[in-house]
Image (cartoon, rainbow, N blue to C red):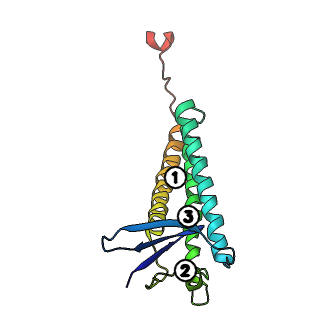
Amino acid sequence: GVEVYRDIGLWGYAGYSDLDSAKTDTSECYEYPDGVHIDGDWEAARVTGGLAETSIAIIFCSLLLWSCCNAFTSLTMSGILAFFSFFTIIFQGCTFLFLKSDLCSTSGDFQAIFETDVAGEIKDCELSWGGKTSIAATVFWFVSFALSANAFRYIGTLERPVDIIVVSAEPLIATDEVAAV
């Protein structure tokens, strides 16, 4: 039989099938049909995916302003990176709530959505390329958060004024009276 694959995503799905003996892949992206039930986990994954993108856009714009226009101090920039990287980790990680959605469960309508007129088997929901890159992105943003938080702490110690207290009765600079002795 012909194998039919469906890569599912937050907003749509892609279909791939081998239609001839030359193993020519055809692929198209489709939006989910109107009748698909979007449960709370799926909706939360969509919202947090959008919030992750917004957080990344803020980081990108801040980096441009800092590097091109010198709009922030290094301490402020490392603080912005640490703050928004932390939220990006949370938001990016929450997109995996999609895997708990009803779409892929036995009570969901996965089979009904992906009925095909091509004789073949429909594969179950499984982590595809987009999900694997989402895992890599979450790890990347964690490393970014760790480095920028460390930079924020380090730069903060460099920019603090240092008070030097000298406890001595001897003058540090010789005056005329002391120099004459």
Mark 1 element type: helix
Residue at 62 percent of width and 72 percent of height: 32
Under mark 3, the amino acid is Gln
Of callouts 3 and 2, the N-terminal one: 3
Of callouts 1 and 3, the N-terminal one: 3
Determine crowd level at label 1: few under 14, some 14-19, many 20+ residues with C-alpha closer than 10 A. Answer: many
Q: Which mark is residue 92?
A: 3
Residue at image mark 1: 149
Under mark 2, the amino acid is Phe
Nearest to the observer: residue 130 or residue 54: 130
Residue at image mark 2: 114
Q: Distance of mark 1 from mark 3, alpha carbons?
A: 19 Å
Q: Quadrant of residue 22?
A: bottom left
Question: Which quadrant is the N terminus positioned in?
Answer: bottom left
Q: Decide if residue 10 is on the left or right side of residue 40.
A: left
Mark 3 element type: helix
**Quick check: marks 1 and 3 in contact, CB under 8 Å?**
no
Mark 2 element type: loop
Nearest to the observer: residue 29 or residue 75: 29
Q: Which mark is residue 59?
A: none
